[in-house]
Image: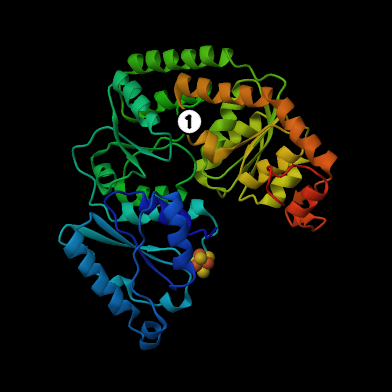
């Protein structure tokens, strides 16, 4: 899928944004609109009526300006993000000449040439960067922690509860569903990127806001303790209270993990939003062996510490990994369970390895503190324990002679339905002719 869609998806999830996409009408725009409707709850993408006549007249920019004014004056959204995609015709358009604000609407340019933005992760980073760069200067009186990262919705609530016990609170969480979530950053006293993902945004936040940063997240035994301590130190909170709360939360994680031991099990993890670093930490602390983590995130300073911890615990991190790398790694070890992308899991299931999709299973669960550890580890154990069902899938594939799907397609090339019918792999419903 087009990498720029990662960004468009984040923007469409903002309730008070009306994103404009400037690209070719029949190519990118059609694809983005199509995907937006089933991924992002029927939110529309806007675009100037880009036709060959407009391209020929060279009036794309005029059409865009007219549209921005009309949308801002009629609908008054909080922001109009303008995303330019790969199309060569948009290169060189004077986006700097667009108004920055119309009434109370912020007009923000988001450059997304997908030919140079290779992953959804990078595209999302560009969105956060463009939005944060527009914020007013940091307020003089400020308090609380700005959480940066994509977590399950209950995580910021739980983090807030713990932070209040040490004398601070969650100020805001970005990316958020409203422009006001971003604007609130100017009231925060500390930035906390929870996973090594929004690296370019963080770089520019450091230039713009002048706030202290803490890395890591309250995930797992060491992570929970270290994160609470770091927040306390960065905000100069009462050291004894911070130590007591950090120790208490760490002990709760230890107790939660004891219920779901993963000793002797080998996991492979492949993810794409930096969240996967924290998941592997949790699995290793629960006793599992994770020799390999594949991530779509590129190597960046935010990942350094987490990577060092994983390496010390026997896990190699492969940055910017692709499907071929993952398939190769899958064959390197006898895995008991795989957590990964759709194609990787499909392949692992054919081999009879219990597998679970990252997005569906991990992004829909809490990861932080003791409750997060329990939720994730119980899911891991139940997935592993259903191994017999996966073995059945594998034997189905070998007994019916269904060809294996490889990264280059079906091998050998056949019509799969014809093949299954010929081998009586499934019976057609009664009265229905195949
Ligand atoms: S041309 Fe570029 S922006 Fe358009 S769909 Fe393809 S990769 Fe995405």
Residue 407, position as x, y percentages in the image: 72, 53
* Left-right relation of 79 to 42: left
Q: Is residue 328 above or below residue 82?
A: above
Binning the other alpha carbons within 10 Å of mark 1 as few (below 14), some (14 to 19) or many (20 upward) gives many
User: Which part of the image, by quadrant, shows the N terminus?
Assistant: bottom right
Q: Residue furthest bottom?
A: 57
Name the outermost residue toward the left: 103
Q: Position of residue 255 (x, y in %)?
A: 52, 11
Question: Taking the image as drawn, is residue 169 in sight?
Answer: yes
Out of 336 and 25, give the one closest to the viewer: 25
426 above or below 387? below
Q: Is residue 114 visible?
A: no
* Residue 160 image point, x, y percent: 32, 26
Whole-percent x, y for residue 240 in the image: 35, 14
Q: Which residue is mark 1?
A: 365
Q: Residue at x 37, y 45 (%)?
A: 175
| Secondary element at tag 1 | loop
Q: Is residue 406 left or right of residue 48?
A: right
Q: Residue at x 71, y 28 (%)?
A: 389
Q: Residue at x 43, y 61 (%)?
A: 33
């Amino acid at each position: 899928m087009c990498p720029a869609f990662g960004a468009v998806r984040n923007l469409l999830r903002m309730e008070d944004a009306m994103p404009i996409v400037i690209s070719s009408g029949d190519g990118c725009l059609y694809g983005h609109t199509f995907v937006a409707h089933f991924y992002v709850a029927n939110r529309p993408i806007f675009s100037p009526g880009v036709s060959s006549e407009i391209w020929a007249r060279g009036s794309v920019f005029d059409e865009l300006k007219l549209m921005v004014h009309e949308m801002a004056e009629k609908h008054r959204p909080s922001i109009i993000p303008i995303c330019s995609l790969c199309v060569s015709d948009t290169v060189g358009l004077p986006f700097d000449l667009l108004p920055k604000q119309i009434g109370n609407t912020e007009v923000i340019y988001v450059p997304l040439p997908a030919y140079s933005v290779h992953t959804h992760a990078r595209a999302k980073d560009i969105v956060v960067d463009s939005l944060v760069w527009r914020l007013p200067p940091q307020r003089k009186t400020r308090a609380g922690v700005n959480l940066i990262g994509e977590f399950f919705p209950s995580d910021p609530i739980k983090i807030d509860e713990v932070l209040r016990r040490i004398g601070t609170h969650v100020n805001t969480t970005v990316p958020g569903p409203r422009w006001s979530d971003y604007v609130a950053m100017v009231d925060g006293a500390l930035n906390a990127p929870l996973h090594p993902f929004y690296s370019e945004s963080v770089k520019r936040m450091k230039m713009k806001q002048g706030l202290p940063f803490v890395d890591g997240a309250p995930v797992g035994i060491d992570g929970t303790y270290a994160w609470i301590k770091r927040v306390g130190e960065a905000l100069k909170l009462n050291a004894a209270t911070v130590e007591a709360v950090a120790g208490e939360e760490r002990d709760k994680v230890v107790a939660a993990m004891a219920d779901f031991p993963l000793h002797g099990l080998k996991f492979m993890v492949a993810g794409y939003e930096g969240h996967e670093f924290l998941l592997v930490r949790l699995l290793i602390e629960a006793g599992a062996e994770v020799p390999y983590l594949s991530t779509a995130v590129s190597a960046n300073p935010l990942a350094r510490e987490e990577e060092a911890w994983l390496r010390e615990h026997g896990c190699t991190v492969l940055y910017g990994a692709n499907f071929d790398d993952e398939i190769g790694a899958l064959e390197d070890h006898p895995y008991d369970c795989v957590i990964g992308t759709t194609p990787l899991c499909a392949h692992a299931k054919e081999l009879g390895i219990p597998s679970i999709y990252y997005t569906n299973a991990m992004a829909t669960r809490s990861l932080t503190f003791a409750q997060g550890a329990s939720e994730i580890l119980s899911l891991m154990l139940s997935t592993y324990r259903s191994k017999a069902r996966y073995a059945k899938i594998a034997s189905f594939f070998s007994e019916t002679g269904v060809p294996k799907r490889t990264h280059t397609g079906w091998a050998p090339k056949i019509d799969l339905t014809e093949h299954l019918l010929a081998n009586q792999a499934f019976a057609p419903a009664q009265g229905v002719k195949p």
